[in-house]
Image (spheres, rainbow, N blue to C red):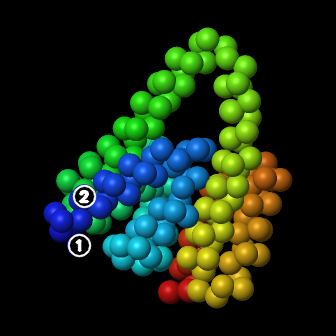
Amino acid sequence: MSEDGEIGPLVLAFLALSLVSVGGGIAVLPEMHRLVVEQHGWMDSLAFAKRFALAQAAPGPNIMVVGLIGWHVAGATGMFAAMLAMCGPTSLLAYAVARLRQRDLPWLRLVERGLVPIAVGLIAASGLLLAKGTVEEATLALPLAAACTVFVWRSSRSPLWVLVAGALYGALLL
């Protein structure tokens, strides 16, 4: 796309996502998908899923998908703007919470415990969204995602085997 007029909406979208990314950037993936694919139309679901897969395969933080989306929308400037918008507010919030934790406030522990089920739910929604966006037949998406989840959860094998199996499955579809 590479349009400079898209940087403003890109930054606003990731600023908002940054402050609700309880559980990490993956927790807001469904909302990120809605903004990027459905609202702004910067890419389709398959392109979104491919960028997410690339960000997950690369070493480093899983939030690198934001940089790839920014790059797609507005080149290098979009990449830096999106990453700063996503990481800046969260970093400041994390710093403030860390300062509060030093005071050992009982209400803060309650808030932290209450955020755990929210984070788990958001991350589960992200997995379902990615499964639906990458599998051609929608009826296969849920069982495939469930099988991968059980494999990673119950197996002592590396989660990379799920990626290998997905890559082989994808190659067979081409």
Residue indicated by mark 2 = 8
Q: Given the image, on which type of amino acid does mark 1 rest?
A: Met
Placement of 3 over or under 83, stated as above or below: below
Which residue is farthest top? 103
Residue sitting nearer the eye, 159 or 124: 124
Residue 140 position within the rendered picture, expressed as x and y whole percent measured from the top left? 71, 82
Task: From the top left corner, tell me how far across and down residue 88 is, in percent.
Answer: 37, 38
Q: Number of marks in the image?
A: 2
Q: Residue at x 53, y 79 (%)?
A: 171
Which residue corresponds to mark 1?
A: 1
User: Secondary structure under badge 2?
Assistant: helix
Rendered residue at 60%/80% (across/down): 135
Sort mark 1 into few (<14), some (14-19) or many (20+) by Cα contacts within 10 Å: few
- Residue 173 appearing in the image: yes
Inspect this view and state whether residue 62 appears. no
The image position of residue 14, as x and y in percent, is: 39, 53
Work out whether mark 2 precedes mark 1 in sequence or the reverse, and give the earlier one.
Answer: 1
Side (left or right) of 6 relative to 114 = left
Tell me how far mark 2 sits from mark 1, CA to CA. 14 Å
